[in-house]
Image (cartoon, helix red, strand yellow):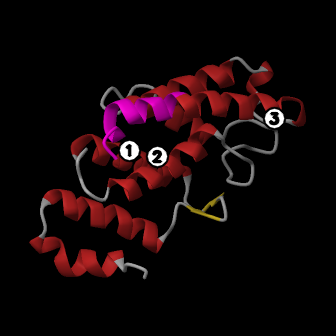
Amino acid sequence: MAIDYPEYLEKYSLYTDEATTQYLNLCAKETIQPTVISEILTINVQELNERAIAYEKFLKDYPNFPMNKLIYANFNTTISKLINPTIYDNLIDANGHASKDLLVIYQNLSKQDNYPILQYIGQEMLQFINNQPNNIVYQDYNSDKLSSNASIIYKKVHQLLNELYTSHI
């Protein structure tokens, strides 16, 4: 059975606590415009950034919320797009460079002390990009490097997620 989060948000947000209202709001956004469809990003990079921050903030603010598994899954989707950008998602340009908008997101995330997971991602992705010849993130010759880097970041991120927010899920 599918849950109509936008309808629930509209009908019940005045009667729910802050955590439930935030939960309904986050889920309604995913219902109206999912972050990905068939693994392809459907939102722009700024919205990806905003959702990633909103998910980490929710997990940080409400670690014992009973429906955190869905927030965790949605956060995981935003993480995967941030650490493994593709040309199909318009996060990598035709020359193999991270888009200017994505670079700005990484720079901003790298300074986010309040969101340690996203801060780590921003810092690691900037370091990866800076270590590539001509800052080329993706070309045939280094596609394995991007994938390997994403795998390393992914493992550390999930360790941090467990330590900080989801050990009880």
Q: Amino acid at mark 1?
A: Ile
Disc 1 on helix, strand or loop?
helix
> Magenta region: which residues?
156-169
* First in residue order: circle 2 vs circle 3: 2
Q: Give the percent coordinates (x, y) of residue 79.
A: 52, 43
167 over 62 or under it: above or below? above
Front position in the image: 33 or 169: 169
| Picture disc at residue 143 | 3
Q: Residue at x 40, y 58 (%)?
A: 70
Q: Assess whether mark 3 and mark 1 are in contact (beta carbons under 8 angstroms).
A: no
User: In whole angstroms, how far apart are the C-alphas of marks 2 and 3?
Assistant: 23 Å
Q: Using a 10 Å C-alpha cutoff, classify the residue at mark 1 as few (fewer than 14 neighbours), some (14 to 19) or many (20 or more).
A: many
Q: Residue at x 49, y 32 (%)?
A: 157
* First in residue order: circle 1 vs circle 3: 1
Q: Residue at x 13, y 68 (%)?
A: 16
User: In whole angstroms, how far apart are the C-alphas of marks 1 and 2?
Assistant: 6 Å
Disc 3 on helix, strand or loop?
helix
**Residue assigned mark 1:** 53
Q: Amino acid at mark 2?
A: Asn
Q: Using a 10 Å C-alpha cutoff, classify the residue at mark 2 as few (fewer than 14 neighbours), some (14 to 19) or many (20 or more).
A: many
Front position in the image: 76 or 52: 76
**Residue assigned mark 2:** 49
* Image quadrant in which the N terminus is located: bottom left
Q: Quadrant of residue 132?
A: top right
